Image (tube, rainbow, N blue to C red):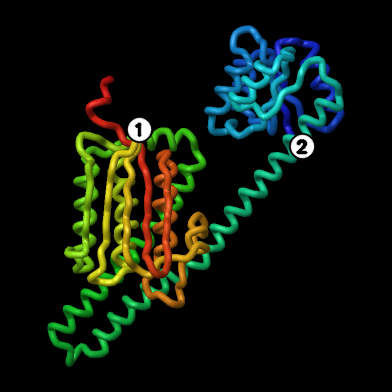
Amino acid sequence: MKKILVIDDAEFILESTSTLLGFEGYEIMTAPDGLSGIELAIQSPPDLILCDISMPGLDGYGVLERVRTHTSTRTLPFIFLTAFTDKANMRAGMEKGADDYLVKPFTREELLSAIEAQWKKSSIVEQHLQQKVEEVSKNISSALPHEFRTVLNQISGSAKSMLSNVNTIDADDIIEISNDIIQSSQRLLKITENYLIYARIEAISGNPAKRDLLRTFHTDEPFAVMLDIASNIADKYDRYLDLSIESDLTDLYIEMSTESFYKVLDELIDNAFKFSNKGTKVSINAELVDAYVKFTIIDMGRGMSTEQINSIGAYIQFERQIYEQQGVGLGLMISKKIVEIHSGTFFIESSSTEGTKVEFTIPGVSIGTTNS
């Protein structure tokens, strides 16, 4: 049985609405003012709220604002009951986050129609979200065993090789095999960390309070961070001469934590080196454009198709059967979602003949303007 909360300071509205909806099979809760209505909504969240706008004390707008900030009630369908007939007041309610409004006096048909419309809307949203969850879950569940199995087989194979040749293996071979095991272990660790980061990002992206908290962090001297990451990755691939960095980032900070910024750059720059050949350039550029810092990473590697680029958003491994290196799908998705959570933009341009360009923006603040 669906539960509806009716908030109105007019007793006859509470009684008549409760009686009408009760006959329709709904469970009804009532509150004579905004504060008690919020308390009821939090204690026993309904499926929908009907709320008067003009009430003494906390009015309907105040109720809506508080409802939208509480975890258990922020997504509830909210319908205003109003005596206002002018479009300005109606528009104000919708702009504040109401789902619909009913002008008093309203008929039984109008009330039931408005409520039914919200049930249909909620059903469509739930179905869409469920499809997205199932799509991502399916892609992850199919990719995860392969990712782990591949790396674990490499570790197991190296260890078995060492054991089977224990009487004849020399020091150089031991060093080589040990390095293979270390590299595979590090790769397995990164895969595991990426799945955990993905789960954390998904939780944050659906929680406005957590998103707002994340946006309070910032990174000082972003160029120094970028240079450090790029240099380390270039060294890892023995391609320091292929690295080109240009930047005018001075006296500013970006509105993203150093941890998140590091993760985005690490994934994108590592991909640029991983999927391009030694001797080809990997260019990194950063510049302040209006109130944003734009980062551009360009490589001359194998590139991606339009379909592959569009697939970022649901975890899909690109061309697993052809290319040995794994992980580009999840790494790109993590980078994209981190940037978008921080009110930035993320864009990929790629072709098989011209390589890949990844461009993303993050809000930036010039230190000289923070006190103005």
Q: Residue lying furthest top in this view?
A: 56
- Indicate the secondary structure of the residue bearing disc 2: loop
Q: Which residue is mark 2?
A: 1
Mark nearer the N terminus (1 vs 2): 2
Q: As displayed, is residue 214 above or below residue 243?
A: above
* Residue for point 37% across, 65% down: 355
User: Is 319 above or below relative to 190?
Assistant: below
Provide residue 345's location: percent of width, then percent of height.
42, 44
**Closer to the eye: label 1 or 2:** 1
Q: Quadrant of the N terminus?
A: top right
Distance of label 1 from label 2 (alpha carbons):
41 Å
At 66% across and 10% down in the image, what residue appears? 55
Residue 326 image label = none
Residue assigned mark 1: 216
Give amino acid for label 2.
Answer: Met
Which amino acid, mark 1? Thr
Which corner quadrant holds the C terminus?
A: top left
* Residue in front for this viewpoint, 372 or 210: 372
Asked whether the beta carbons under mark 1 and mark 2 sit within 8 Å of each other, the answer is no
- Report the number of discs: 2
- x and y, in percent, of residue 85 in the image: 74, 14
Residue at 27% x, 25% y: name it. 370
